[in-house]
Amino acid sequence: MLTRTDKPRKRLQAIRSDNATSRAEKRGQRMTSALFADNNVKLDLLRRRAFNGRWAMQAPDVIPLTAADPDFPAAPEIRAAIKGYVDDGLLGYGPAEGLPEFKETMARVVAERKGIGCTPGLILPTDSAAAGMFLIARHALEPGDEAIIFDPVDFLFGQAVDAAGGKRVYSPVDKAAGTFDLGGLRRLITPRTRMICVCNPHNPLGRVMTGEELLQIGRLAVDHGLTIMSDEIWSDIVYPPHRHTSMAGLSPEIAERTITVFGLSKTFGLAGLRIGFLVAPTAHAYERLAELSRVRTTAAGVTTLSQVAAVAAYRECWYWVDAFLTHLREMRDYVVGRLNAIPGVDCRKPEGTYVVFPDITGLGMDSQKTADCLLEQARVAVVPGLPRWFGPGAEGNIRLCFSTSRGILTEALDRIERALRGRGKAGS
Ligand SMILES: Cc1ncc(COP(=O)(O)O)c(C=O)c1O
């Protein structure tokens, strides 16, 4: 006899064969279906390797739609590059401020793809985008200084400001409309303001900021002499017709004030390698960032293996990203459609990222209760809209990550739908 927890597990095991047929019927997706097929999600391996609230940290019957981390294996070229480097056998110290080929490749790709004029000498590798954000906050803030951050937004912004001794000043985001209160930004600026933090594309709203929106923020920073922390880790995960615009590509005056963070966790699924990098605006800023980062003391730094992986990713794997995007776009449409069919749930379609942030106020439960209900009754883990994850403005929403297979998402959404049936208020 199946126990309550066995049943969903059996269904998960059946996903591979169930979905093979419908996938085979799909046309024009040869590359995508090979790389992002259901059978490329290795549940046994994920249950041992995928942490940060994901498979390895959940009961065996739970589907985690929690941390924004792909369930798919990294591109073959990245794996081959790491293996090749290890097989050469020499694993001694690398250059403190990064391998020359890392700095050269990142600078070239950032210039070509993001339109930011930069040279290898302005690229500083960091052991994750998160570490890069903390470093920028220390660079820009003295204790007591104020930094403006969106609300809601990924928790790393607030934590980076706190760690530098700064004070968070929240700029509200209209979650329903997906708009930023740019007119109100100016009113938040005081004599203690030193930095504006931008998350573009925005996690968790999935908004891709327009050039006009960015210009307004950029001009404000120029007028008030503020640093801009521009987190563009999601900039490769953008769905047409939307296009990513880099803050530092807008004008030389804005570029001079902007420190951009890029990462490889979201685009290439390399979060475990803890690799990202900063693009400094000037040699002077680079110098200060490098000094503050402690890489020159060797007490910090990015492993050479992670840099080698990043070089392979940026040189050889954009075909993989294109296929990933094709898959993600389908999953986005599928997830949004299924969620909006549940009474009491209202989900905006993200323009970028692979997370959705549906409004669940129509269910009559707060975000923690909704997440508890989904875990208990659907055996699906989601992130509740609590202040500690996204800021005080996140209540009333939950976040779900969709960078997994169609089979897993189908199973998860079937379960969610069953668990929430009858809870939505009439007419919502
Ligand atoms: C907006 C944003 N910035 C930074 C990060 C952290 O990336 P990394 O894994 O490179 O530290 C994340 C991860 O979720 C994110 O969403």
Image (cartoon, rainbow, N blue to C red):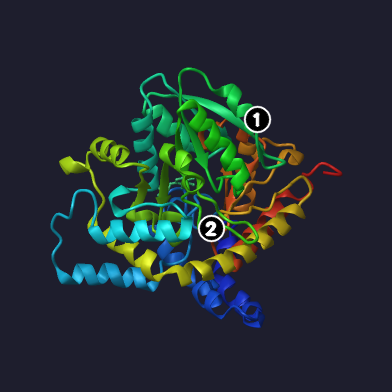
Along the line of sight, which residue is nearer the eye, 106 or 395?
106
Q: Residue placed at 72% from the left, 41% from the top?
A: 177
Along the line of sight, which residue is nearer the eye, 13 or 128?
128
Q: Tag 2, which secondary structure? A: loop
Question: According to the image, label 1 marks what residue?
Answer: 183
Give the amino acid at mark 1. Gly
113 sits to left or right of 386: left
Relative image position of residue 327 (x, y in whole percent): 58, 68
Question: According to the image, label 2 marks what residue?
Answer: 237
The answer to whether one can see residue 189 in this image is: yes
Quadrant location of residue 205? top right
Quadrant location of residue 108? bottom left
How far is disc 2 from disc 1 in space, using C-alphas? 28 Å
Q: Tag 1, which secondary structure? A: helix
Task: Indicate yes or no: mark 2 CB to ligand 1 under 8 Å.
Answer: no
Q: Residue placed at 62% from the left, 82% from the top?
A: 24
Give the amino acid at mark 2. Ile
* Number of numbered discs visible in the structure rendering: 2
